[in-house]
Image: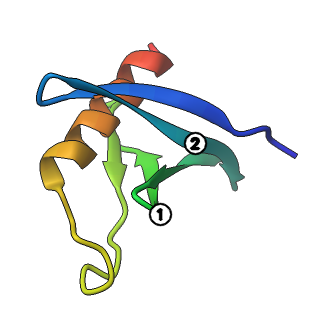
Amino acid sequence: MNEPFIIPVTYQGTVHEFKARFERWGYTHRIAVLIDEATFVFEPDEEGGYRALSINATTVSLNVGLLQAVAEKLRSLSN
């Protein structure tokens, strides 16, 4: 079992700390990140970055800029 960890992300001049969890997914992995009581799943993309998988946007107010900031932070952690 993977232990949760904290990802510090700077977005619009403020540092946010999000709980995250590494998940094995076949031959690759995903990282589940808890943002404002909703879990967003990020997976590696072909360019070496991360992308958020689609979610039900009707239940969560989606902040694309914040998701991009989290994806960039995950990319920097993997390098």
Q: Report the disc number at residue 37.
A: 1
Which residue type carries mark 2?
Ala
Q: Report the disc number at residue 9.
A: none
Horizontal and vertical percent for residue 41?
47, 57
Horizontal and vertical percent for residue 32?
55, 52
Horizontal and vertical percent for residue 57?
25, 79
Residue in the picture at 18% in, 57% down: 63
Q: Which residue is labeled 2 in the image? A: 20
Q: Give the position of the C terminus as an image quadrant.
A: top left
Q: Left or right: 30 with respect to 36?
A: right
Residue in the picture at 37% in, 63% down: 53
Horizontal and vertical percent for residue 23?
68, 49
The first of marks 1 and 2 along the sequence is 2
The nearer-to-camera label among 1 and 2 is 1
Label 1 environment density (alpha carbons within 10 Å; few <14, some 14–19, many ≥20): few
Q: For the residue labelled by badge 2, is the local secondary structure a helix, a strand or a loop? A: strand
Q: For the residue labelled by badge 1, is the local secondary structure a helix, a strand or a loop? A: loop
